Image (cartoon, grey):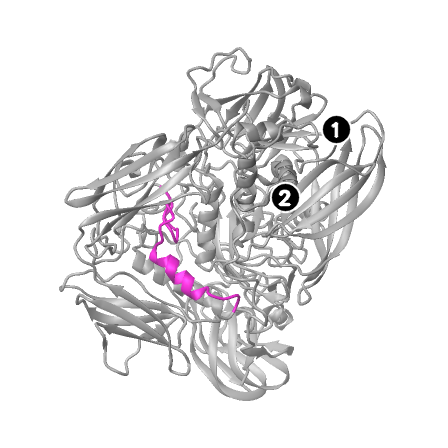
Amino acid sequence: MTQFSRRNLLKLMGATAPALLLPKAILRAQKSAAGGMDLDTIEDLKAFAFDEKSPRKKFNFNLDWKVATGGQQGAEEPAFNDRDWKLVSLPYAWNEDDAFKKDIHDLSVGIAWYRKSFKLPESARGMKIIMECEGIRHAGTFYLNGKKVGLSENGIMAFGFDLTPYIHFGGTENILAARIDNSWDYREVATNSKYQWNDRNFYANYGGINKNVYLHVLPTLYQTLPLLENLGTTGVYVYATDYAVAKKQAILHIQSEVKNESSASQKVQLEVTVKDMEGKLCGRFSGETKEIASGKSADLKAENLMKDLHFWSWGYGYLYEVETSLLVNDKKVDAVNTITGFRKTAFEKGMVYLNDRVIQMHGYAQRTTNEWPGIGNSVPAWLSDYSNGLMVQGNANLVRWMHVTPWKQDVESCDRVGLIQAMPAGDSEGDVTGTRWDQRKAVMSQAIVYNRNNPSILFYECGNHGISRAHMLEMKAIRDQYDPNGGRAIGSREMLDIPEAEYGGEMLYINKSSTKPLWAMEYSRDEGLRKYWDDYTPPFHKDGDGPLYKNEPAQTYNRNMDTHAIENVVRWHEYWDGRPGTGDRVSSGGVNIVFSDSNTHHRGESNYRTSGEVDAMRIKKQNYYANQVIWNGWVDIPSTGIHIIGHWNYTDKVTKDIYVVSTADKVILLLNGKQIGGKNLSGERSDEFLFKFAGVHWQPGELTAKGFDSKGKVACTHTLTTTGTPVALRLKVMQAPGGLQADGHDLAMVEVEVVDKEGRRCPTALNMINFDVQGPATWKGGIAVGPGNYIGATSLPVEGGVNRVFIRAGRSAGRITVQAKSEGLKEATLTVKSQAVEALDGLALKLPAAALNGKLTRGPGPDGPTYTVKRNAQKIIAVTAGANTESAKNSYDDNERTAWENDGLLSTAWIEYTLERPASIDEVVLKLNGFRTKIYPLRITVDGKTVFDGKTGQNLGYFTAVCKSVKGAKVRIQLAANLQNSGDFMGEEMGGKKLGDGVASKSGNENAKGRLSIIEAEIYEMVK
C-alpha cells in the first residue's frame, strides 16, 4: 500500500495528533469512502483508492463531465468528438439559467447528452462496478463504451446500473454517455404512458443529471445498495425497537442484504460497530452467520441493546455511524457505513409523539425542487443545509415535500438540521388507476428503500390528494414490506374517513381527530414580494395591487410584507386554538406553502410563486419573523417572543397602524422612550398573537415594543431604529464550512447591503449594484424585480437594502475577487480563496456532504410534558333532534366526512345532547356546514338556560362559542334565526375548482334558510 504523507495524515487527525496514532488514521482514511474524509491530493487518492486491501470503495463521480444539447448523433460512441462541449461538474441541469427567469411552463426542454471519461486500475478487475445516481430529469439512457447499460424513466428516484460487464481495466479509458430527455410529454417506453407528476404547474423542469452520482467498487461478496430501480436490491436496514427514552436506551436492529457473486459458497458473519457524533465507539456486536451459495443472496441480521443514546429530535440532528461488516473466516471482506439516528414515534389520540413528547406540526409545504435563481435545484450540499436550517431557525419543525420524493441531499440535510419530513412518492392531483397507479407504487417502493434509514422522515405521503381505501391498503402494504419498523406513519392528504390511513389532513382548512393525527397540508397560500414593505414605502406598492387572476382581483396574491405577515398570524390562530391539550379531538397543526419563493405556478405579478417566508435567495421576509414568534414551542410556547412588523424609516407625513406579533400577555409600544397612547394603553389584541397600535405618527428615532408576562414583568422586547442616509456598500460571503471548493460545482453566496454611516442596513434602499468578478469563478448572479428578474445579470438592485448573488467555483483553485459599486456610494470588495479538489482518472474521494455535521441547536427536547390541559371534553351518551334524529350521531362521530342536518325548516333546526354527567359548560366548539360561506345565528342552552346567543363567523373549520358557565347535562344547539349567506373569503383553487365548504347535503337543502347542519360538535368544561 502506498503510504500517506505525514503532513496529510496529521491534517486528517489535527496537528497535535501523536505519531503513534498514525496507523489508526490510515484505517480511518480507508473507511472514508463512506464518510467522505478530507483526502484531496493525488497521493491520498492513490493511497486509498487503489489499495487492494480495502474491501469497498465509494467515489465521487460528479467531477468533469461534458454536456451538449440536441440530438448529437453518435454521442454514445467512445470515439465521438466532444472537444467543444461544455465542461461541468454534477449535479448540473443543462437549463439551469432558466430558473426564475422563465415561467415554469416555458422552461427549456429537449435532449441533452452528458459524457464522462474515467479509468480503473487493474486491481479493480474481478470486482463489482456499480454506478449510483440520485436522480435525473426526466428520463435517461446510459451507455458505457458504446454499449447500452440501462434506462431510468420516472424522473424522481435514485437508480443504479451494474457497469461490470462493460468496464475497461488496467488504465484504459472508459467513456460513460447519457442521453437525457426532459420533455413535459415524455412517455414510459414499456407502457406508452405519461407520468402523472411530470406536471407544468408544480414540478419545475431542470433537465439532465441534476443530482449526485457515485461509483462503487465492491467485492464479489458484498452488501447491496438500496437501489430497487434496475438493480432490485434493498441494502442495509437500520432501526430500533424497545425504546426507553428516559433511560436513553433502545434495541438496535440491523438487516443487511448480502449477495454472493463469487465462484464459491461463502460462510458469512455480520459484524456491527456504532460510533457517535464524536467518533467514539459506543457499540460493537456480532450477528448471524449464514452459508450463502454462489449466485445467491440472503439477509443477515444482528441486534443489540444500546445505552446512553442521544435521540434525534427537532433541531437536534444527532446522528450515528453504523458500520456493518461481512466477515469470512474472521477476515473483513466488506463494510458499509450508514449514517442514521434513533427516535421514538407514535401517532395516536390525534397527536404526533416524538420521544414520548407530543409535538404539534408547524412548518412548510415546500416544492421538492427547492430551487434557487439561475441554479435550479442542483446546489451544493452546504446550501441545502443553509436553506433547510433556516426553517428550523424560524421554528418550523416539519417540511412537507410536495408531489414527488425529495432528492437524497435534502433528505440527509434534514437529518443534520433536525427537520421532520413528510416524504411523498409521486403524483399530481387526485387518485389514478392502471399504469399511472403502478408507477406511483413503484416510486413509493423505491423511495422507502432508499430513505428508510433517515430519521427525519416521519411521514410517508401517498398522494397530494385523497386516494381510495383500496389504494391506501396497497401503499400501506409497501410500507410494511420495506419499512415495517421505522416508526413512520403512512397516509395522504384528506383520508379523514379511512381508518387504515395513519395520518391525514385537508388543504386550507383545520381538521381535528381523537384517533389519527390530522394536520393541514397547506393552510395558507397567499403571495407577496419581499420588495414591498407596505403602502408607505418605496416603490409604494399598494397592498393587493397587481394583475387580475382569472379576470378577478387578486389581492391575496399581491400582498406586501405587512399584510402577508399579519395573515400568517391570523391563519395559524385556529390551529393553535385546537392544539393538543384543548380536548379529546385536536388539530395536529399544519404547514404553510411555501418556505422560499418557487419557480412554480403563480397568481401574482411575478412569473414565479412568491408565497415564501423567504425570497428565492433565502432573504427573510416579515412573515418569517411572525412564524418564528408564534411557533416557538412543541405545543405550548415555553418562552415569550416579539417582533414589530416592518421598519422605521418613513417621512413626517406618514401615520400608520403598527402591528406587533408576540406571545406575551400584554404589549406596549414606545416611541423614543415615550409610551404610545398613554401609560395604560396596550395593543389591541386579536388572533392570540397579534397586537395592533392604530394611527401611529412617524418620528425618527427608536420604536420599541415590550411584551409582559402574566405577572406584569417585561418578558421580551424588539426595537426598530431609523437609519441614516445610504453612504456605502457592504459585502459578506456565505460558503461551505470547509471553504469554497474548486470542483466546478460549489457556490459562494455573496450578500450586498446598503448601509448608513453607522454601518446599519438602510431598509428602504433600492440602489442598483454593479458587480465585477475576477479569478477562477463563474458569475451566476441573483434575482430582483425587473426585466427577466435580473437572472444572470451583473447589475441588479437591492430590495429593502439587501440582495444576494452567486459565484460558482471553477476547477482551478485561486483568489476570487468580488467588487460591488453603486452610484453615490462607497464601493466594497471581497476576496474568496477557492481550494483545490483533486480527481484521479475521473474519480474523487471527497463526497458532497463530507464537511457537514449535525446541528444540535435546540437541544435534545423537553424533559416534561409539552402542553397543559386547558379544558375537558364532555362525553355525549344520547342525542335527539328536531329532524333526522337517526343521523344525529354523525354530528359527534369524530368523522368530518359525515354530518347531521335538519329538514331545512327553522322550527326543526335544533339538536340536543345528553351528557354522561352534569358539568359546567364553558365552551361549545362546532364544525358547521358552510363554515366559509354561511353565518349561523345560534342559541345554546344548558338544561334550558341560555348560555350563548350570537352569530358564528367565517372560519377555516371550527367556531368556538364561549358560554356563560352553567352546570347541566343537556346541551341544546338551536338556529335562532334564518341562516345567512356571506361572501367567500377564500377564493378558488389554481385550476378554478371550488374549495370545500363542508359536507354535501343528502337532501339538497344547502340553501334552505332554516337549515342547521353540524359536522362535529364538542362540549367543554374548562380546567379551573
Q: Quadrant of the N terminus?
A: top right
Q: Are marks 2 and 1 in contact (CB under 8 Å)?
A: no
User: x and y percent of residue 808 in the render?
Assistant: 39, 34
Picture quarter containing residue 328? Answer: top right
User: Is residue 347 visible in the rendered structure shown here?
Assistant: yes
Picture quarter containing residue 584? Answer: bottom right
- At x 62%, y 73%, the residue is 885
- How many numbered callouts? 2
Range covered by the magenta-colored residues: 608-635
Distance between the Cα atoms at labels 2 and 1? 32 Å
Identify residue for label 1: 220
User: Is residue 188 visible in the rendered structure shown here?
Assistant: no
For this orientation, the residue located farthest to the top is 79
Q: Is residue 227 magenta?
A: no
Q: Which mark is residue 21?
A: 2
Q: Which numbered mark, 2 or 1, is in the foreground of this view?
A: 2
Q: Nearer the viewer, residue 23 or 52?
A: 23
User: x and y percent of residue 272 in the render?
Assistant: 73, 46
Picture quarter containing residue 977? Answer: bottom left
User: x and y percent of residue 22 in the render?
Assistant: 62, 40
